Every structure is written in C-alpha cells, then in structure tokens.
Image (tube, rainbow, N blue to C red):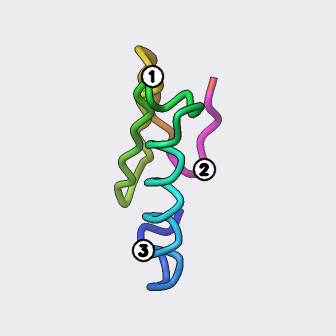
Amino acid sequence: MRNVLPAQQVVDYAVGNHCVATHDRSPCVTRPHIQRRRTDRLDTLDALVWATERPGRETG
C-alpha cells in the first residue's frame, strides 16, 4: 500500500472529495465516510462501521 499520491492525484482527490461531500444528492451529506491511510493500514469509518485493512492480510 502506497501512502503518498503524486501531486496531481492529491489535487484531483481533494476536488473530487469536495464535490461528492457537498452535492445535495450525495449520501455523504447525511452519512459520514472517513478514511485515514497510514503506512501499515487503512482505517475507514462508514456511518457507524469501523474497518481496518492491512496490506497482505485478508479482510473478513
């Protein structure tokens, strides 16, 4: 898992994230969806469901 995006992808991700998060019909307006990428894992909160994914390990 790579922790760093190339500069253009960071900008694209930020703009895309803003558009999805603020659009009237987006589920993100009423339900939080948050991700935090670390060097050893990806933590995700989707509504009330917390998940941690680690590279090379099966999720289940």
Q: Which callout, 2 or 3, points at the residue further toward the start of the chain? A: 3
The residue under the point 39% across, 38% down is 34
Q: Does residue 51 lie above or below 1 as drawn?
A: above
Task: Give the residue number, with chain letter if any, for mark 3.
Answer: 4
User: Looking at the picture, which amino acid does disc 1 mark?
Assistant: Arg
**Nearest the eye: 6 or 57:** 6
The residue under the point 50% across, 65% down is 13
**Nearest the eye: 43 or 15:** 15
Mark 3: give few (<14), some (14-19) or many (20+) Cα within 10 Å: few
**Nearest the eye: 51 or 58:** 51
User: Looking at the picture, which amino acid does disc 3 mark?
Assistant: Val
Real-space CA distance between mark 1 and mark 3, rounded to the nearest whole angstrom:
27 Å
Q: Does residue 39 lie above or below 26 as drawn?
A: below
Residue 9 in magenta stretch: no
User: Looking at the picture, which amino acid does disc 2 mark?
Assistant: Gly
Describe the element under mark 2 as helix, strand or loop.
loop
**Nearest the eye: 39 or 5:** 5
Q: Position of residue 21 (x, y in %)?
A: 46, 43
Q: Which callout, 1 or 2, points at the residue further toward the start of the chain? A: 1
Mark 2: give few (<14), some (14-19) or many (20+) Cα within 10 Å: few
As drawn, the label of residue 31 is 1
Q: Position of residue 31 (x, y in %)?
A: 45, 22
Q: Position of residue 30 (x, y in %)?
A: 44, 21
Q: Nearer the viewer, mark 2 or mark 3?
A: 3
Magenta-highlighted residues: 54-59
Real-space CA distance between mark 1 and mark 2, rounded to the nearest whole angstrom:
29 Å
